[in-house]
Amino acid sequence: MTDWFEVVNMTEENNPGTTIADKLYNRILNIYLDERDNRSEEQMGLKPNGFTEATVIKDYPIRNRKVLLHVRRRRYLDADGRNIILNQYPLNTEGTKVSVEYGLFFKDDHGQPAINCRALREALSD
């Protein structure tokens, strides 16, 4: 993740939620990440054009804090003035809003859950 994105801000706030998982984590750590300029030599002709709106991804809890990653991708303009977003990164598990690593933590293993915590599974399905 840090190869592709840089941390631009972090904030912490109370967790106002009412789900079961919100009772587990009474604070929220928001980490804001912006995509690095990862253009190759051939792509240097593209003109930078700001960032996309942030995508929010749930990640591993850190010291009793729910973690939300706010990820913004770079946009570029091509010679015809069209917006282009380069590179596709494996940021979240398909069909979820959790990071790939966090999703693997809850992956089923031969029909048996890797973790037996119904409250966390229900919270992640939101």
Image: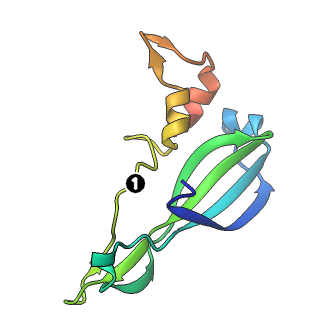
Picture residue at 50% right of the left edge, 30% below the top: 104
Label 1 crowd bin: few (<14), some (14–19), many (20+), radius 10 Å: few
As helix, strand or loop, the secondary structure at mark 1 comes to loop
Residue furthest toward the front? 41
Q: Which residue bears the numbered disc 1?
A: 89
Residue 69 visible from this viewpoint: yes
Residue furthest toward the left? 80
- In the image, is residue 123 above or below residue 68? above
In depth, the one of 74 and 20 nearer the eye is: 74
* Location of residue 117 in the rendering, given as x and y in whole percent from the top left corner: 63, 20
Picture residue at 46% right of the left edge, 18% below the top: 108
The answer to whether 64 appears left or right of 38 in the picture is right
* Location of residue 54 in the rendering, given as x and y in whole percent from the top left corner: 51, 66
Q: How is the image coloured?
A: rainbow
- In the image, is residue 120 above or below residue 12? above
* Location of residue 3 in the rendering, given as x and y in whole percent from the top left corner: 53, 58
* Location of residue 31 in the rendering, given as x and y in whole percent from the top left corner: 66, 59
* Label total for image: 1
Picture residue at 35% right of the left edge, 81% below the top: 76
The answer to whether 51 appears left or right of 115 in the picture is left
Picture residue at 56% right of the left edge, 28% below the top: 105
| Three-letter amino acid code at the position of disc 1 | Tyr
